[in-house]
Image (cartoon, helix red, strand yellow):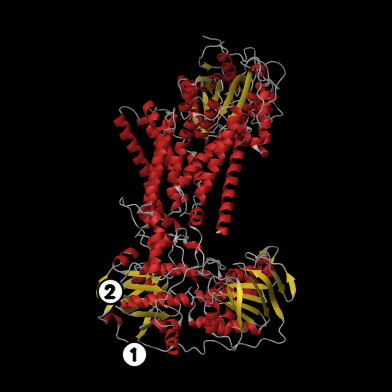
Amino acid sequence: MVGMLNRRSLLAASGIGLLAAGLPGRPFAAERKLKIALSNSYIGNKWRIEMENLFKAALQMEPYKSQVEGSWFNSGNDVSQQSQQISGLIGERVDAIIVNAASPTGLNGILHQATERGILVVSFDNVVTAPTAIKVDTDQFQFGKKLADFLVEKLNGKGNVIMVTGVAGTFVDKERNAGADSVWKQHPGIKVVNRYTGMWDSSVAERNTAAILPSLPKIDGIWCQGGTDGVLKAFIAAKRTPLPPTAGEAENGFRKFMTGYMSQKVDGLSIGQPPYLVLVSLELARRILQKSHPRKDITIPFPFVTNSTVKVGETVFPNLPDSFFADFTDSGADATVKICVDAALTGKACEGKLDVRLPSQA
Amino acid sequence: MPPDAAATLAARPQRRPRAAHVLGQNIGLVLAAAILLASAVVFTLMFVIQQQRLPGSFEITSTVNNTMPLAVAAIGQTVVVLTRGIDLSVGGVIDLTNALAAIFLAGSPLHMIVVSILVVLVGAGAGLVNGLLVGLGRLQPIVVTLATLSIFQGLAIRVLPQPGGSVPAGYTNLLVNPDAPTALIFLAVAILGWMALRRSRLGVELFAVGNDEAAAVALGVNALRTKIVAYSIAGALYAVAGLFLAANATSGDATTGNSYTLTSIVAVVLGGVSLFGGRGSAIGAICGAFITTMIVNILFYAHINPLYQAFYEGLFLVVAVVLGSLIGNLLRRRG
Amino acid sequence: MSLAERAEGDPAATIAARELSKAFGGVQALRSASFAARRGEVHALVGENGAGKSTLIKILGGRLHADSGNVLLDGNAVRLGGPADAARRGIGTVFQELTLLPWMSVAENLLIGREPRSALGLIRRNALAGEAEAVLAGLGIHHIDPRALASEVSLAERQIVEVARVIVRQPRILLLDEPTSSLVEREVEWLFARIRELRARGTAIVFTSHRWNEITSVADRITIFRNGAEVGTFDAIDEDEAVTLMTGRRVEALYPPLPPVPSPAAPALQLEEAGVGDGGTVSLSVAAGEILGVGGLAGQGHRELFLGLFGAPPLARATIRIGGEPIVITCPADAIHAGLGIALVPEDRKTEGLLLPLSVRTNLTLPILAQLSRLGVIRGGAEARMSREIIDSLGIRTPNAAQPVGALSGGNQQKVLIGRWLLAQSRILLLYDVTRGVDIATKHEVYELMMRLARQGRAILFYSSDTEELTHLCHRVLVLSRGRIVAEFAPPALTAEAVVAAAIREPHAA
C-alpha cells in the first residue's frame, strides 16, 4: 500500500500547504501494479459503507495487495461530480474503473470516453447502460421470485400476504415486484392483501407497517424488499404474534429474529443484494486485465440463509446493530467469497488470502 | 436668503479615481475570477506533481464539458436572483428538459434543431409559470419555485420513467465535443448575450427591480413584466442546460438534474451575485460554476478520504464566501 | 391675503385635482380635496403630517389612484396609468421616499430610460458617466461623482440627484414632496435657483415643506391642507395665521424658554480626542441640565459622533468620561449601562432604532427588558404600567400601547425613540435630528419635552439639520466640519447666520 501511503501524506501536507508536499516518490516496482479505482456515488447508508470497507480491506489482502494499486472516490448523487471524478481517473490513466453510478445513464458519455482510451469499466449494483461497460449484478427478478416461492411453500399455496416494496420508480424495485407477481399468478390461493413501500429503510418500513396494520386481516406471510426488521418490530408492537413466515432482505436485525430475538422466532428466508458485489467487480477487473477472464457481464447468485443455515458469527451477529447488512460475505460450500466481519466494519484486512470465485462460464 | 443667483454646488477637492469605482462596483466578479484563477493554479500544480505532465486537452475539455450545464443554469439563476428572487425549480426544469431531449433527439439535423428549440420553449414555459406565480400571485419566489420544482420533477418522471433514451453522437459532438473544448464557443456566445442584456432596457429594468422594486415602479418600470420575463429567460437557460446534460451523458435520466438546484445557487454566490438582488454579473456566475468543478478536481488530486469530501467542499465554499465578503468590505472602507 | 376661488374653477390651471378622495385601510388620507397650480408659478403645499399632502402629490404624479375625483391637465380629466404615463404627459415628480436605486451608479440613476445608445440600440455604458457629468454640470452640480453608487453618496446628494433626474427631463409640471428635508442652506439655495429658472420657463411647480422661511422665500401661492382637504389658497399669509389654519388651533411661541444650566455645572459627559472621520478629532463636554448643540453641514461626522458615543460602532481612540469617571464603550449595551440613551432619527427616518412592526410597548421597553424580566419571563403588568406612563407623559398619540409603531405618525415615532431612554433612566440623551420631517405642532411638543428633560438634570447632546432650531434650543452650539470642531457659540453670539458661516468656511482653503 505504498501508493495509498503517499496519498495520505499528501493529504496531511495539504492542510499546511499543498505545494509543500513536493514530489511524492512513486514506487517503481519490477512489475507494474494494476491501477484500479472505485468510483462510488452515494455514501450515506450502511450498505455503501460496508461495500467501500470491503474494497479497502481487499486491497490490503493478497492477491490484490501485491498486484493492485487501488483508490476510491465518492461523489454523492451528483452526476456531474461523479463524471468529473471519472475524468480525473481517465487523466490519471488508471487501468480499470469500478463504478457504482449515480445514474444508470448519466455517466454514459464519460464512460464511453474511458473505454475509448483503453480503460476497463466495470459497473455494479446501480449499473450503467453504457454498452462498453462490463456489468456485475444479481438478478433482481429472481430476488423477488425466490422470496415469493419461499412463502408459497411455507403457506402451502394459501393465505394472506403483504408486500413491502422498495423505492418506486427504480429498476430494482420494479424487477423484484415483477418476480413476486409472476409467482402469485401461478398460486391463486395466495392473496396479496396490501402492498406499500418501505423505501428499503427499516424505520420507514416500521412506520408504514404500523400505520397500515390495524386495517389488515390476519397476515400469514410477509414479503419484504428491505427494512424487514422494521416490519417485524411493527408486528410485535401491534401484538400480531407469533410472527408469520417472512421472506426478506439481509438486515442483521431480521436474521436475529430468525435465530430468536425479542422473544420471537421467525421462520424466514433472508436474501441480500450483497455488498461484496464490489469484490466480484474487483476480481473481474483484475482477471480481465490479466487476460485470464473474457470481457463479459456476470450475474452472481444471491447469498441467502434460511433458519436451517443461518449461523451466529458468520451470517448473523447478535452484537452488531439491526441495520448492519449481514450479507457482506457469502456462506456455504459454493460461496462466491468469504471474508471476515472486521473487513465490512472497519475496512481492515482479514487473515489469509482473499478468494473470490467468479461464476463458471456457461 | 440670497438673491436669485444661479447657485452652483462646487466640486469636492478630490474624487476617487475611476479604477477604484470599477473595482469597487465589480468586486464580486473580480473576486470570483481571482478564486477561479487561484483554484486553477492549485489544480495545475497538483496535477503536474502527480502526473509529471501539464493538464492536456482531455482534462481541459472534460472540465469544460462537465461544467457547461451548471454554467448555463447559473446564468439563468443569476437573472432571477438579480430581481431579488430565487429559483429552486432549476433541478426540475433540467430533469424535464433532459428527459425530453433524451427521448426526442434523433433523426436528421433539422429534426434535432426543431426538437432543441421546442425543448428550450418548454423550459421557457416552465419559467413563465414561475414568473406568473411570483409576479401575479405576489407569492414568495422560494415557496413558488419549491413547489414547481416538485411538479417539474414529477413531470420529468412521467416523461421518462426509467433512465434511457439516447442522444445521437453528432449532437453530442456539436454541443460537448469530447476531443476539444469547443463548448467554450457557446460560453462566449452566452457572455456576449449577457453583455447585450446588460446594455438593454430589459437589463436595466432587471437590475432596477432587484435594487428597489418600489423605486423601480416609481420610475416607470413594469416590475411584473420584468419578473415574468426574468423567470422565463431563466427557464429557457435551464432547458439549454438540460440539453447540454443530455449531450454530455449521451442519454437521459429524469433525476440527474436535481443537484443543479443547489449547485446553481452555489455558483451564483461564488460568482459574487448578491442574493439580495440588484448586484452581480452572469460572468461571475460562470466563474462560480467553474470554481465548483475546480473544487472537485482539487479534492480528487488531494485524495481526500471520500467520506470527508463533502466536508471539504463545504469548507472551501464557506472560506471562499467569507473571504470574498471580507475583502469586499475592506475595499469599500478604503474607498 | 385673500381666500382664492375654489380650485377646480381656476381656468389658468395647468394641473388640478378635483374633489379627490383616497383611503388607506380605515384611514381617510384625502377627503374630497381640490387643488390647482398654474403655469409659471411656484405653489407651496403646507400642512401637518398626515394632512394629505404626500397622498395628493402621489396621485398627481401617477403613483396612486384616487378612490374618487379627477386629475385635470389643462382642464381635461385624465387617468394617469402610472409614473411613466405621468412622465409622458409632462409631469415630473420627486417623491418623498427617494427612488434612487442603491446599487446602481449616480449616472445610471440619473439617466435611466434615456441612456446614450449605440447604433445597435445598446446602452453605451462607457459613455454614461461622461454624459451624467455633463448633465449635472448643466444644472450647476459639480460635487457629485457620477461613477459613485447611489448608496455611496450622502443623503443630501441623493436628494439632489433625484431632483436633477426629474428636472433634466424638462417637465411641464414639477411636483416636489419635501425636496429640502435633507438639504442644508447652500443646497436649498441651489434648488431654489433651479426652481426659479423653471418658473421663468413656464413650468408649474408644486412643492411641500415644513420650513416656513423656505416657503415664503420661493412660493408664489400657498395652499394649506388640514385633515385631508384644502383649507384655502393664499398669495401671502403670515406664519402664525398659517399655523393656526394648519393645526386648527393657535400655537404659542414655537420655541419654549431655555431653563438655566444649574451651577456649578457638573460635567455629565466628557469626550476627548474622538476620531469621527477625515482625520480630525472631537473633544466636548456636556453638563447635567445642559443642552449642547452640534451643528454644521450634513455628512461632516455628526452621525459618526452620535453613533460612536453609543458604541455602534465605537469611536476610534476616544476617551469617554461619564460623571468624571472614564469608561469604555464597545457596544450599545455598554452605553445603555453607562446611562446613555440615543434617539437617532436616521436620514431616511425608518431604518434605525424602531422595530416598526412591533408594538409601541415593546419598542419602549426593549432596552430595559432585563430589568423587567424575572427568570427570563417578562413581567407583563410592569411592562404595561411603565409604557403607559411614558405614553401619557410624552403625549404619544396612539390608540393603545399594543399598536405597531409603524402605524404612528413620524412625530409620534420620534417621541417613542426618546421615551424609551426615559424608561431606561438615561442621564445622557443623544438626540439626533429628532424633529426631522415633523410638523410644527409636534415639533413644539418635542421642544417642550427637551426642556423638561434638561430641567430634570439630564445632559442632552443635540444635532439638528435645522440651524434655526439649534440656536433656539441649545445653551451652546459646536460647529462640526470635516470631523473637527471649528467653532463654538453661546448667546449672544449664537445666531443661525454665525453657525452657517462657520460651517461653510472651507478649512482646506486656508
Q: Is residue A142 visible?
A: no
Q: How many marks?
A: 2
The chain carrying label 1 is: C
Q: Which of the 4 image quarters holds residue C475?
A: bottom right
A245 vs C190: above or below: above
Q: Is residue C320 visible?
A: yes
Q: Amino acid at mark 1?
A: Ser
Element under label 2? strand
A185 vs C502: above or below: above
Q: Amino acid at mark 2?
A: Leu
Residue C459 horizontal side relative to residue A75, left or right: right
Q: Which mark is residue C379?
A: none
Residue A326 position, x and y percent, is 64, 25
Residue C354 position, x and y percent, is 56, 68
Q: Which of the 4 image quarters holds residue A94?
A: top right
Q: Which mark is residue C72?
A: 2
Residue C65 horizontal side relative to residue C295, left or right: left
Identify the residue at image location x=51%, y=64%.
B14
Q: Which of the 4 image quarters holds residue A255?
A: top right
A88 vs C492: above or below: above
Query: Do the numbered discs 2 and 1 sit on residues whose CB atoms are within 8 Å?
Result: no
Q: Quadrant of the C terminus of chain C?
A: bottom right
Q: Which of C203 and B114 lies nearest the eye of the viewer?
A: C203
- Disc 2 crowd, CA 10 A, few/some/many (<14, 14-19, 20+): some
Identify the residue at image location x=67%, y=38%.
A15
B100 vs C390: above or below: above
Q: CA distance from mark 2 to mark 1?
A: 24 Å
Which of marks 1 and 2 precedes in the sequence? 1
Residue marked by disc 1: C2
